[in-house]
Image (cartoon, rainbow, N blue to C red):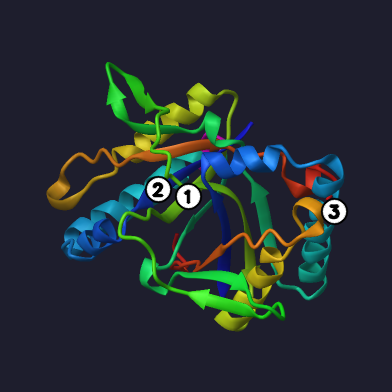
Amino acid sequence: MKYILMMNASKAHWDAYATWSKDDLDANVAFMRAFSKELKEQGVFVATEGLGWPQQAKIVRAGKDGEPVTDGIFPESKEFLAGYWIIDVESPEQAYRIAARASAAPGPGGTHGSMPIEVRQVLSGFADLGI
Amino acid sequence: MKYILLMAGTQAGVKTYRAWSKNDIDSHMAVLRRINKELTDSGEFVITEGLAGPDQARVVRGLKDGLPVTDGIFPESKEFLLGYWIVDVKTPERAYEIAAQICVAPGPDGRPTNMPIEVRQIMSRPATS
């Protein structure tokens, strides 16, 4: 069963992240690298990606002629996807245990993080659906 | 440059989708399949995934007594990721064009869904990672 572990954050959280010291950022990145390596060693790693800053986010709709109409204004409360992992595990409980590890990634000043991680099953995908 | 096209919706929106007729779902999927094929043919396709329904979503925050702390209660306004595409394109404008095509995929009675698509760049990472 494939599960996606998502980190979501408001713009205010992203802005706070931008003020972290270099040491704090390095510690966080080192944790993320070690975490991905650990998932690979356990044979559960499928993919991970980090997304660009919310300031660059655009919402796209189609205009009358089908041409893209973009908008970059979002409500302050909007949660932006910051990044995700996809893992292939035996049970949702295993996915939650792994998410709890990600949740504890170190924060500013080496504090023990408690970042919320949203966990959802990934469907078999378009390929498996024959699409 | 890799971009991610995110399709998100509230729980209410997902309930509406579940009420679509089989014909409407088939027509919608046929268009998504055609878009995937066109992106594959043009060499821009990286991956697409669909997520399970929001009713199964859990938020995990750390461990308590060695067990993950999970919560399945969300505000009604919460936008759940429903699925995404990653495309490898030359410009952001090309990513917006593809998003617009997804936006006009047909919904009930063949009318375009006009589903807004959030477009974000994927961060490149150092070769060492």
Residue type indicated by callout 3: Ser
Determine whether, in the image, residue B24 is placed left or right of residue B90: right
Residue A7's disc is 2
Which residue of the protein is positioned furthest toward the top in this rendering?
B65
Q: Which residue is mark 3?
A: B27
- The nearer-to-camera label among 2 and 3 is 3
Locate residue B93, reporting x and y percent.
59, 82
Locate residue A98, reporting x and y percent.
43, 32
Q: How many marks?
A: 3
Q: CA distance from mark 2 to mark 3?
A: 33 Å
Q: Mark 3: few, some, or many residues within 10 Å (few <14, many ≥20)?
A: some
Decide: is A29 above or below B4.
above
Residue type indicated by callout 1: Tyr
Looking at the rendered structure, the secondary structure element under dot 2 is strand
Indicate the quadrant where residue A81 lies.
bottom left
Locate residue B123, reporting x and y percent.
46, 67
Q: CA distance from mark 1 to mark 3?
A: 30 Å
Q: Are marks 1 and 2 on the same chain?
A: yes
- Asked if the residues shown at circle 1 and circle 2 are in contact, with their CB atoms under 8 angstroms apart, the answer is yes
| Residue shown at 76% from the left, 48% from the top | A126
Q: Which residue is mark 1?
A: A84
Q: For residue A14, say whether it is visible.
A: yes
- Please state the extent of the stretch shown in magenta in the rendering: A40-44
Q: For residue A122, say whether it is visible.
A: no
Determine whether, in the image, residue A9 is placed left or right of residue A26: right
Q: Mark 2: few, some, or many residues within 10 Å (few <14, many ≥20)?
A: many
Magenta portion: prevailing SS class: loop
Residue type indicated by callout 2: Met
